[in-house]
Image: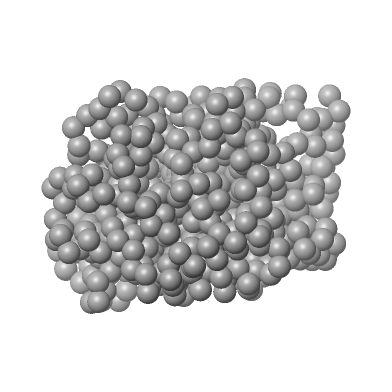
Amino acid sequence: MLGVELLDRWLQEIITHCQPDNTEVFIASPEQLLILKTRMIEDGLLEPLSGNERWLHRSDSTDVARMEHRTFICSLHERDAGPTNHWLDPQVARETLNGLFAGSFVGRTMYVIPYAMAPLGGVFTQFGIEVTDSPYVALSMSMMTRVGPDVLDALISADPLDVVRGMHCTGELDPYNRWVCHFPETREIWSFGSNYGGNALLGKKCHSLRLASVMARDTGWLAEHMLIIELTTPAGERQHIAAAFPSACGKTNLAMLQSSLDGWDIRVLGDDIAWMRPGKDGLYAVNPEYGFFGVAPGTSEKTNPVALSMTERDTVFTNVAVTSDGNPWWEGMKPLDVDTSVLDWQGRSRTVGDCAGPLAHPNSRFTSPLTNCATLSDSWNNPEGVRIDAILFGGRRPTTIPLVMEAQDWTQGVLYGASMASQTTAAATGAVGVLRRDPMAMLPFCGYNICDYFGHWLTMTECVPVLPKVFSVNWFRQDESGKYIWPGFGANIHAIKWISERVSGSVDVETTPVGNLPIRSDLTLKDVDISEAAIELLTSVDKAAWMIEVDAIAAYFTSLGETVPIELRDRLDSIKAALR
Ligand code: OXD
Ligand code: MN
C-alpha cells in the first residue's frame, strides 16, 4: 500500500501547513451530505428552494466567472506553456502559494474529496483528490465528478503518481490575490482565492482539460472542450458527434437538442468535456464528468426544455434570482410581470422592471447530475466510450463562416479547429462580444504550448484507424442590423442531419476551396422560418470575405510564433491561392 502512504504523507503535510480545525474524507454518503447541507444552511451558504432537493448558493459578487489572467501553467520550461498561456515559474508559484496557504484553514474543516473522472473500470478512468476548505466545492464535486466508497477503493489501488492532487483554499476572495496554478509535471493543481466554477471545482477545467491535455499529448489521445451526442437515424444507424464551442456558445443546448424530424433521435453523453482515445476502429470518447454545470440565463422552454425539466430536482443553482414563491428565475425564462418582486443574484430585493441590470448573473449556473437528464444516452457510463463519427468546430461568428461545411481531409479539419474564433461571453471575466481566436475552444484550457497541440492533433492520422469527419458550424451569422439570420436551437437539427448524411455517405457536396458545402436541396429546413436569400447567404462562400479571413488566420498563426505546424500554414496558403 505504498500509494496510500504517499497520499497520506501529502495530506499530513497539508494539515501541518494549512492547520484545519477538522479533516473529513468526503465520499458524499447520504449522512455526510445531510450534515454538509445542514451546516451550509446554518452558515448562510445554501438556501432551500421550492421543489425537490433544489438549492441556491450565492457567490461573492467579485467571484462570478473564470479568471483567465489569474490562471497559470507552471511547467518547468516556459516554452511548454506556449504563447497563449500565462506561465509562472513553478518554484515561484509554490513559494507564493505556500505563503498564502499557510494557516489558511484555521477555524475551518478541510474536506478531502477522492474523485474519479470518466466511468470506472476502463482505460479512460482517472483519479484525483481535491482538498478544500469550501463546503460548496465539496457539494459541487459530489455532483460533477464520481465520488463514493467504490471510487475511494479504486483510487487506493491506483498508482499514486497517476493521481491528480488538487489543493483549494477559498482565501479572502480578493480578485487581485486569486491564483489557479497547474503543475503538469507533478499533476498538481493549487487554487487560492476563488470559490466559483472552474476556478474551484478542480476536477473540471483544471484536471479534465489543462492537466489531461498534457497527459493526452504524452500518451497519444485528446482531452477536449467538447460535448458528445448520440444520433439515431431513421435507418436505425447510431452515430456519435463531438463538438467544440467556446464557453457559453450553446454546447448544453446542442447536447440536449430534441429532434423535430421524424425518425431522428438525439441523446446526450456530455455537454462540456470529451476525452477521446484511438481505439480498434476509430476514435472513442467518454465524458469524464458526472454532472452538468450549465449557464442558466437563456435556458428556456424554447431553447432547452430538457435542461429546464432537469433542474426541477436535485439541483444547485448559483447566482440566479429567486421569486417570492422560492423558484429560481433568470433572464430568458418565462417573463414575469414588471412589478413582480424578486431577490436578485446578490439577494437584493428588486422588481422585474426596475432596469437596474440583470436579475440573475449572466454567468449564473445550475449544477445537476447527468442522470437527471431525460435524454441521457444509455452509453453514458460505458467505460469503453463511444466511437466518434464526426467532430464539429463552431463559434459565434457574425460574418463569413457558413452554417455548416465539411473539411476535405483531416488537415483541413485541424485547420478549422486551429483557426476557430468567437465573440467572447460572460463565462470568463473581461469584455463581452469581442471577436477572439479560440483554437478548438481550448484557448483557456490547453495545458501546454498551443502550437504543439496543433501538431498533436495532426498526429492522429498515425494512430486512429478511421478518423471522424470534421465540420465547421456557425449558428450566429448576423445581418447588417445585427439580427441573427439563423434561428438556431431546434433548427440546428437540419445541420446535424446533413452532417449525419455526410457520415453515412448518402448526400453529395458542393466543393469550394474552404470546404464542402451542402447542396441547397439536401437541407430540408422543415418548419424553419428563413428566406431563400438568407439560406443562400448561409450556404455560400463570399470570396472577398474569405480572403480577409484567411489573412486574419495567417496573422494569428504568425502571432503564435514559428512553431505552428507547417502543414497548417501550407494549407492556408493553398486555400488562399484557390480563392484568387
Ligand atoms: C464552463 C466554461 O464552465 O467553459 O464550462 O466556462
Ligand atoms: Mn466549458
Quadrant where the image shows the C terminus: bottom left
The answer, for residue 349, to whether it is visible in the render is: no
Q: Position of residue 393 (x, y in %)?
A: 45, 52
Question: In the visual, does 237 lie left or right of 291?
Answer: left
Residue 463 image-quadrant placement = top right
Q: How is the image coloured?
A: one colour
State which quadrant residue 83 falls in. bottom right
Residue drawn at x 66%, y 48% is 456
Query: How many numbered marks have been drawn onto this rendered protein structure?
Result: 0
Residue 245 seen in render? yes
Residue at the image point whose x is 53% and y is 56% from the top: 415
Q: Taking 8 as reference, is 207 above or below it?
A: below
**125 versus 140 height, above or below:** above
Which one is in front, 375 or 55?
A: 375
- Name the residue at 66% across, 60% down: 566
Q: Position of residue 235 (x, y in %)?
A: 27, 24
Question: Left of 543 or right of it: where is 551?
Answer: right
Residue 267: give x, y in percent of width and height. Answer: 35, 33
Query: Residue 96: image x %, image y %?
Result: 79, 66
Q: Quadrant of the N terminus?
A: top right
Between 418 and 253, which is closer to the camera in this rendering?
418
User: Which residue is painted at 69% across and 69% down in the image?
Assistant: 561
